[in-house]
Image (tube, helix red, strand yellow):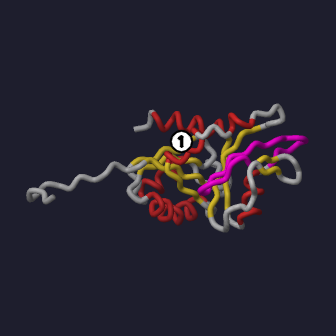
Amino acid sequence: MSRPPGEAAETAPAVVHVVFYRNLNLGHVRSPNREQLEGALNRSGASHVKSFQTNGTVLLKAEDPERVVAEAASELAAAAGYDDTAIVRPLADLERVLAMGVFEKHRSPRTYRETVTFFQGGKEPSWSTPWTNPKDDVDVLYVGDGIALSLIRKPRNSAGSPTFELERATGGVATTRTRGSIDRLLNAAATWK
């Protein structure tokens, strides 16, 4: 359908994505502060940016979020020395995976944290789920499309690491957030403009 001369084409609203930066803690050594992080993403073409908490989780609206994050990487490296991985996922992926009710089906008094791990590169893990690591401190309950849902235990001084288990199994990179952080992120996104 043609438009009258001078009438602009309508563009679809940018879908909300979440950027999960690996090993980024705002304001720490080799990590940007909030202003540097949000500014780099804005200058790289995002229409809206909101850093969430301090663990390198960012709500982002952009027509091409992968390009925006890739372009911001050089500025973050120059400003703060940060040069690790960023995994970009549509917000809808998080809503979908939590709506499956996986955690609710695997309640255990041994659980220290419910976690959501995002991974990319390498191969899909070959585990049948639920899978428990040899140290018996990580149960991977679900794996699909670069997302893993896990329960971790803390039998001694340190808790199990789904990030380590996913990186070892895939040969790629991973970053993990607690389920509580993801729930708070979804609540924040629901009111974000």
Q: Nearer the viewer, residue 165 or 82?
A: 165
The quadrant of the image that shows the N terminus is bottom left
Q: Is residue 193 magenta?
A: no
Can residue 39 be seen here? yes
Three-letter residue code for mark 1: Glu
Measuring 65% from the left and 36% from the top, which residue is drawn there? 180
Report which quarter residue 153 is drawn in: top right
Q: What residue sits right under mark 1 in the picture? A: 95
Residue 30 position, x and y percent, is 65, 58
Magenta residues, start to end:
140-160
Measuring 23% from the left and 52% from the top, which residue is drawn there? 10
- Would you say 70 lies left or right of 64 here? right
Residue 166 position, x and y percent, is 73, 58
The quadrant of the image that shows the C terminus is top left
Q: Most extreme residue toward the right, as rendered?
A: 156
**Residue 190, above or below 32:** above
Can residue 81 be seen here? no
Q: Nearer the viewer, residue 49 or 124?
A: 124
Q: How packed is label 1: few (under 14 Cα within 10 Å), some, or many (20 or more)?
A: few
**Residue 31, above or below 121:** above
Quick one: SS at disc 1? helix
Q: Is residue 148 magenta?
A: yes
Residue 52 position, x and y percent, is 55, 42
Residue 129 position, x and y percent, is 74, 51
Q: Most extreme residue toward the top, as rendered?
A: 109
- Would you say 107 lies left or right of 157 here? left
Q: Nearer the viewer, residue 24 or 2?
A: 2
Q: Most extreme residue toward the left, as rendered?
A: 5
Measuring 91% from the left and 41% from the top, which residue is drawn there? 156
